[in-house]
Image (cartoon, grey):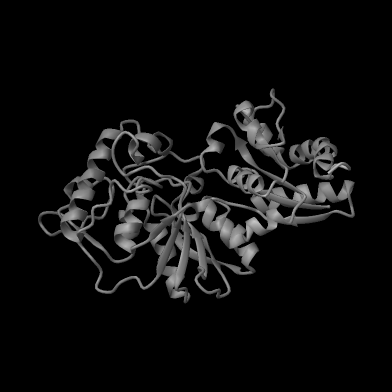
């Protein structure tokens, strides 16, 4: 029997690699002669670098960067062995400009910027990378990628020719954008499953602003609309309405206009790097999951991508989640759904016990899952 473990992280508790390891150890304890294939997945957010480095046999390097409030931190870049047409480096904007880097802090959306992400991009180039895969989930920013652009050498000037330093607070004063003397010299592919435009009722300020500390999205909407106007005037690019431009507080827009980046489906791109479809086809059972599964899982999340591949190949797929909600909407896509957290347990307590709860839930589910993986005698 061959079992494929393709789980994403349990955010705030366990990495994708840790989730898969715990499930593998639990399965092999009960079925020691089983062939277990561990393939941590990601969709562009936290865990992307680790998942790709594990799959490609690369290494992780620590580099100096800045968090979203311009405080010095250490971030990570994954360096990958060369492979024709594939990235040779991978990084996550969340490891620099992400909400996770400000955990427990007061959010300051008028100061928060993506300068640290730009420093990651520069570091990848300086380490010899020619093609960077950048995941942009989990941002703390809403600056349209201006901080990133400043780190790349773009200058943002007011009407008097003075350089603006604090973005996005001062974006309404933007009058002119000056490109750097030399291009970045790094091909950027963006792993992004968000299709929102930059502006409007489905734009980044309106849809995602509250989680970044934005109480009134209108001033941020006006600032980003002004940025888009200046970009069109000075750089000749009109991408505010493009799908994905609203990703990561407009970083999707900024990466396209300031770094000539190509946005692609995060899950599809990473699944290709992991060789996930071939691994699904070779398995008798697929186990996927993430920290929280609900109706949003149906819209581009990693477990749903795994389930779609399993359905294409006629393979049974089950899911395990830290928290499971609206299971009825997911039931059509999974042969079994398991929640690790008892209904009465508070989220914070569940997160502290995540490893033990995952192991306990898996032990209870494995006998059912083993039957799913066993071919019928009549088949």
Q: Is residue 165 left or right of residue 124?
A: left
Q: Quadrant of residue 83?
A: bottom right
Answer whether residue 213 is visible to the viewer in this image.
no
Front-lying residue, 341 or 112: 341
Q: In which quarter of the image is residue 364?
A: top right
Residue drawn at the location 27% of the way across and 39% of the way down:
221
Residue drawn at the location 34% of the way across and 31% of the way down:
215
Q: Is residue 189 above or below residue 286?
A: below
Front-lying residue, 108 or 45: 45
Extreme residue in the top direction? 344
Front-lying residue, 306 or 353: 306
Q: In this view, does 27 lie above or below 333?
A: below
Q: Position of residue 106 (x, y in %)?
A: 43, 38
Q: In this view, does 19 lie to the left or right of 75?
A: right
Residue drawn at the location 55% of the way across and 75% of the way down:
82
Extreme residue in the left direction? 160
Q: Position of residue 306 (x, y in %)?
A: 62, 47
Q: In this view, does 163 lie to the left or right of 17?
A: left
Front-lying residue, 150 or 315: 315
Answer whether residue 312 is visible to the viewer in this image.
yes
Residue drawn at the location 65% of the way across and 44% of the way down:
311
Q: Where is residue 19 in the image (x, y as percent from the top left)?
A: 70, 48
Q: Position of residue 173 (x, y in %)?
A: 17, 48
Tally the numbered discs: 0
Q: In which quadrant will I find the C terminus?
A: top right
């Amino acid at each position: 029997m061959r079992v494929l473990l393709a789980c994403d992280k349990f955010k705030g508790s366990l990495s994708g690699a840790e989730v898969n390891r715990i499930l593998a150890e639990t399965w092999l304890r009960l079925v020691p002669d089983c062939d277990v294939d561990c393939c941590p997945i990601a969709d562009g957010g936290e865990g992307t670098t680790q998942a790709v480095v594990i799959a490609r046999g690369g290494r992780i390097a620590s580099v100096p960067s800045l968090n979203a409030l311009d405080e010095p931190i250490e971030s990570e870049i994954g360096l990958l062995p060369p492979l024709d047409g594939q990235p040779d480096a991978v990084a996550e904007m969340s490891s620099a400009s992400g909400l996770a880097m400000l955990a427990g802090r007061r959010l300051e959306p008028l100061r928060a910027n993506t300068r640290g992400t730009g420093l990651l991009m520069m570091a990848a180039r300086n380490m010899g990378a020619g093609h960077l895969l950048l995941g942009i989930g989990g941002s703390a920013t809403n600056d349209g990628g201006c901080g990133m652009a400043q780190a790349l050498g773009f200058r943002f000037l007011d009407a008097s020719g003075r350089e603006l330093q604090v973005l996005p607070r001062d974006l309404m004063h933007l009058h002119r954008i000056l490109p750097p003397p030399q291009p970045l010299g790094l091909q950027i592919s963006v792993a992004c499953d968000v299709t929102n435009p930059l502006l409007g009722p489905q734009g980044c300020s309106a849809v995602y602003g509250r989680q970044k500390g934005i109480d009134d999205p209108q001033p941020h909407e006006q600032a980003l609309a002004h940025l888009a106007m200046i970009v069109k005037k000075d750089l000749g690019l009109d991408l505010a309405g493009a799908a994905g431009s609203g990703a990561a507080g407009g970083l999707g827009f900024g990466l396209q206009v300031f770094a000539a980046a190509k946005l692609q489906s995060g899950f599809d791109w990473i699944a290709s790097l992991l060789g996930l479809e071939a691994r699904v086809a070779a398995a008798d059972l697929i186990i996927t999951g993430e920290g929280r599964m609900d109706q949003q899982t149906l819209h581009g999340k990693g477990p749903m991508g795994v389930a779609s591949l399993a359905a294409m190949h006629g393979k049974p797929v089950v899911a395990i989640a830290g928290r499971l909600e609206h299971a009825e909407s997911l039931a059509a896509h999974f042969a079994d759904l398991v929640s690790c957290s008892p209904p009465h347990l508070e989220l914070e307590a569940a997160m502290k016990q995540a490893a033990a709860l995952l192991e306990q839930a898996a032990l209870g589910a494995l006998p059912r899952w083993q039957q799913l993986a066993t071919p019928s005698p009549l088949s």
